[in-house]
Image (cartoon, rainbow, N blue to C red):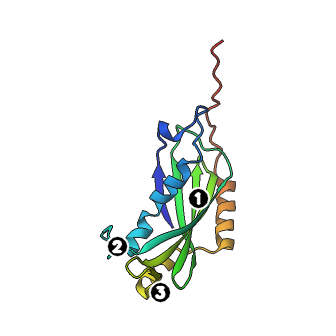
Amino acid sequence: MFKRIITPRMGDTDAMRHITNTALPVWFEIARNELIEIFNPDYELTYKKWNLMLVHMDFNFIRQCYFGYDVEIRTYVTKIGKSSFTVLHEAWQNGKLRSNGKATMVYYDFIRQESNVIPEDIRIKLKEHFIGPEELDEKNRVEMKNNKKVNELDYVESDY
């Protein structure tokens, strides 16, 4: 698992101090940087060197996220195929799972315009961050049960 702390910006919010639904995809993309490093340690953005293609993303908005509290993005590898892999991102704030989403990436040759088999050395590194669905469900269940409730700001303001 990879962890990354995001401090929400004002630009990530709507008028009600909620994090907008457009911020989470950006945060999840940032959280994939460590995975991208496994495939592209030098981050060389050329057709000759770049070898990952994002082919699918989806999101589940479980609870609202708020401005004023850091968000921890957790990234797991949940599936490793012949030429693709799937990651699960979770957004946690104040001890609660707020959102999750999956992204599928393909190991790709942009010159030949075809997918490639993920090399064994990279596959081994991906497996270090693998988690199965039962293990993840149990981990999250225990964590949410053990977390102490953090009171979030009751943002009610009146001009009257």
Image quarter of the C terminus: top right
Q: Secondary structure at mark 1?
A: strand
Q: Upstream in the sequence, badge 3 or badge 2? A: 2
Q: Nearer the viewer, mark 1 or mark 2?
A: 2
- Is the residue 63 above or below the residue 101 in the image? above
**Hey, what amino acid is under mark 2?**
Tyr
Q: Is residue 64 toward the left or the right of residue 116 in the image?
A: right
Q: Secondary structure at mark 3?
A: loop
Establish if 40 lies above or below 81. Answer: above
Q: Nearer the viewer, residue 39 or 7?
A: 39
Q: Quadrant of residue 153?
A: top right
Q: Nearer the viewer, residue 158 or 55?
A: 55
Which residue occupies 54% across, 55% down?
25
Residue at image mark 2: 47
Instruction: Tell me: 140 left or right of 129.
Output: right
Amino acid, disc 3: Val
Callout 1 crowding tier (Cα within 10 Å): few <14, some 14–19, many ≥20: many
Q: Which residue is mark 3?
A: 117
Q: Which mark is residue 44?
A: none
Measured from the top left, where is residue 110 in percent x and y?
40, 76
- How far, Cα to Cα, is label 3 from label 2? 18 Å
Q: Nearer the viewer, residue 47 or 5?
A: 47
Mark 2 element type:
loop
How crowded pointer 2 is (Cα within 10 Å; few <14, some 14-19, many 20+) is rated as few
Identify the mark nearer the N-term, 1 or 2: 2
Q: Is residue 23 visible?
A: yes
Q: Give the alpha-carbon distance from disc 1 to disc 2, as whole Å.
A: 31 Å
> Disc 3 vs disc 2: which is toward the camera?
2
Question: Can you identify the residue that label 1 sits on?
Answer: 90
Q: Is residue 128 visible?
A: no
